[in-house]
Amino acid sequence: MEKTFIRVRSAKDIIIFVSLVIAGSVLILLPTGAAVNITGFFLIFAGLILAFVLKSGYKDIETGEKFQKVEHYFQQAMNAPISAAIVSKPETIDLSEEDKGNALRLDVYYSKSSGKAYLQIFEYVPYKYEPCSKVCGHPLSKVEKLIK
């Protein structure tokens, strides 16, 4: 069973673009000068653009469960230790080695409501990251160090 995650709108995304549209509408409806009306139109336009492009949540295709995502970047030399750690002991991943390179990306998908977390390693090949490990599931308590 292969886990696949797609990007979706989170509640925070919806709150942001609805707030911008409402704030812009209020500025337009107020009896003020042209500069304030222009600002209102700009806020409405920004809110509508964000409604189409802002997607910061993730959803498991099979179950429909929603997740959040954290990314960690490591150098290529960390491939073997991280690959071994995500299978059995994700709490042993050394975050002091993070940001010393960007050849590897560790994606952590987690859901606080269900207490589940999934980890996967991606390797940088020119112009994109390709998966180099399977998705490994763990309880959230084992990966709390990785999501802070």
Image (cartoon, rainbow, N blue to C red):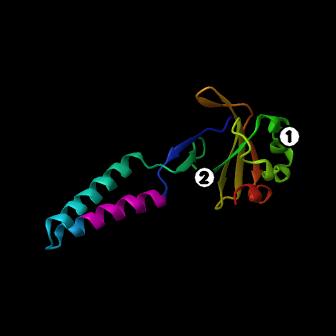
Q: Is 130 situated left or right of 66 in this image?
A: right
- Percent x, y for residue 111? 64, 56
Q: Main secondary structure of the magenta part?
A: helix
Q: Looking at this view, is 9 or 124 the one in front?
A: 124
Identity of the residue drawn at 74% across and 35% down: 134
Residue type for callout 2: Phe
On residue 67, which mark appears?
2
Q: Which residue lies most toward the bottom here?
A: 31
Identity of the residue drawn at 60% across and 46% down: 63
- Quarter of the image that includes the N terminus: top right
Crowd tier of the residue under label 1, counting other residues whose Cα lies within 10 Å: few below 14, some 14–19, many 20 or above: few
On residue 91, which mark appears?
none
**Quick one: SS at disc 2?**
strand
Q: Is residue 52 above or below residue 146?
A: above
- Percent x, y for residue 96? 80, 52
On residue 81, which mark appears?
1
Q: Is residue 44 above or below residue 129?
A: below
Q: Looking at this view, is 25 or 59 the one in front?
A: 25
Q: Which residues are magenta?
A: 11-24
Identity of the residue drawn at 75% across and 46% down: 137
Magenta span has 40?
no
